[in-house]
Amino acid sequence: MRSRDQKSSKSTVGVIVMKLFLDTANVEEIRQAAAWGVIEGVTTNPSLAARENEEFSVILPRICDLVNGPISAEVIALDHEGMIAEARQLSKIHANVNIKIPITPEGMQAVKVLAKEGIKTNVTLVFSANQALLAARAGAGYVSPFIGRLDDIGHDGVALVEEIVTLFNIHGLATEVIAASIRHTAHVPQVALAGAHIATVPFKVLKQMFNHPLTESGIERFLADWEKAVKK
Ligand code: G3P
């Protein structure tokens, strides 16, 4: 794995340590995953928020209480002034909230202003290296390439993650890459090997990451052997 310049993602041996975020607005899923000790942030979007029964303005502070790490909340406005106004409101909810903004000219105008104000952004709906480059130049804290949606149309989502990471490394861009739209467990090690700083995974995929038939049969065998030994 390549070494990187971004201090926040470096281990003691100087290589990237990919973090796992949970991609959901469901408080119960976040509560469970946080208790397992394996997630360090949460990403949401309007589709995920719309699946919940409560207002997002109620859900977001709860998420911030459960996870002490970056929490992405997305703007709905499409014009830069509207995006900036929403971002300022959302960022007041908690210091860990960062603002998801789509990769559009209006969006990048908003990112530039917000970066100057110290409000971190996560540029979303990224499907090309050019879009990632524009987001980084505007001052985005994160870019989110959507790998599953690219795979859906016959492209290679993981290859895009690798291309963006390589491009950011060559040019010393500090923007972190969040591999998003992850659909299955195989995507997670693939984006880790591609150099993603973060993989944001749905709860179902996070649970599946624990599973292996040899772990399950191994536990059963250990317990059976223990029982036999106790009965001797
Ligand atoms: O983080 C973005 C992600 O939620 C999109 O996933 O499965 O709707 O493509 P999906």
Image (tube, grey):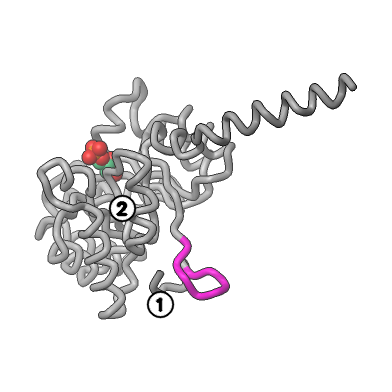
For the point 87% across and 24% down, the residue is 230
Is 27 placed left or right of 43 in the picture? right
SS of the residue under disc 2 = strand
Type of the residue with mark 1 = Asp
* Rendered view: 78 above or below 196: above
Q: CA distance from mark 2 to mark 1?
A: 19 Å
Type of the residue with mark 2 = Ala
Is 89 placed left or right of 104 in the picture? right
Mark nearer the N terminus (2 vs 1): 1
Q: Quadrant of residue 112?
A: bottom left
Q: Quadrant of residue 134?
A: bottom left
* Rendered view: 27 above or below 18: above
Q: Main secondary structure of the magenta part?
A: loop
How many numbered marks does the figure carry?
2
Which x, y percent locates residue 69?
49, 51
Q: Which mark is residue 5?
A: 1
